[in-house]
Amino acid sequence: MLDLFADSDPWHEPLAPGALILRRFALARTAAIFEAIDAVAARSPFRHMVTPGGYTMSVAMTNCGALGWTTNDRGYLYSPVDPLTHRRWPPIPGVFGALCHDAAVAAGYPDFQPDACLINRYAPGAKLSLHQDKDEPDLRAPIVSVSLGLPAVFQFGGLRRNDPLKRLMLEHGDVVVWGGESRLFYHGIQPLKPGVHPQAGEYRYNLTFRQASNNE
């Protein structure tokens, strides 16, 4: 892995070992990204997934890519088929893939090849509780997370749920990349506050790119 912090660029904000925030990194592409989100959602609509424990998630979700993250009564899994439409998930749009590649390179992970992109849509009050991204078979691959629309408070902790948390405001166009030592750090989003964004309206969107298959 490259030295994440060799660059003194003020838009590169160190977060933890192996992790940083690329402030406003996606701004120039947001119009095309929103068009692509609409195209994905037209084929695989947003839905509120139900956890294995019966809890309906407050965040609406859909996926694109060869695999999509979903739930059933036995747990969390990646599936090539959308359980709502019974068709394959839409492919990752080109604008998504290009942004993810550029962000991964900027963060020091030039070999990252995502095959799954989870799209989250937050309405006011929606949140994502502290969790680890650990359903992927190869944890050497990083996570690339793109924030769009309304601002939200991102929580980033450590390897244990009760480790101290950093709380950082993520705004439209910010990209967070984490891997290496921090790949399994707990993270979440505090309840979204009401507002109106010129492009996203009353919502916050998040694109989370992962390598969900084992490429070995």
Image (cartoon, rainbow, N blue to C red):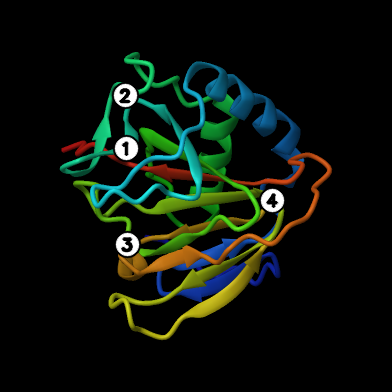
Residue in the picture at 44% in, 21% down: 91
* Marking on residue 83: 2
Query: In percent of the image, x 46 and y 64: which residue is there?
Result: 188
Label 2 crowding class (10 Å Cα cut-off): few <14, some 14-19, many 20+? Answer: some
Circle 3 Cα neighbour tier, 10 Å, few/some/many (<14 / 14–19 / ≥20): some
- For marks 4 and 2, give the CA distance: 30 Å
Q: Earlier in the sequence, mark 3 or mark 1?
A: 1
* First reached walking from the N terminus: tag 2 or tag 3: 2
Number of the label disc, if any, that sits on residue 132? 3
In the image, is 163 to the left or to the right of 62? left
Query: Gap between marks 2 and 3, in whole Å?
Result: 23 Å
Three-letter code, disc 2: Pro
Q: Earlier in the sequence, mark 4 or mark 1?
A: 1
Q: Residue at x 78, y 55 (%)?
A: 195
Instruction: Choose between 58 and 4: the one closer to the eye.
Output: 58
Q: Is residue 125 left or right of residue 118?
A: right
In-front residue for pair 65/7? 65
Alpha-carbon distance for marks 4 and 3? Answer: 23 Å
Image coordinates of residue 87 in percent, x first then y, are 34, 13
Residue 94: quadrant of the picture: top right
Helix, strand, or loop for circle 1? strand
Local secondary structure at mark 3:
loop
CB under 8 Å between discs 2 and 1: yes
> x, y percentage for residue 135?
24, 49
Q: Secondary structure at mark 2?
A: loop
Disc 4 and disc 1: Cα gap in Å? 26 Å
Which disc number belongs to residue 173?
4
Label 4 sits on a secondary structure element that is: loop
Q: CA distance from mark 2 to mark 1?
A: 8 Å
Residue at the image position 38 percent from the left and 38 percent from the top: 114
Residue, disc 1: 70
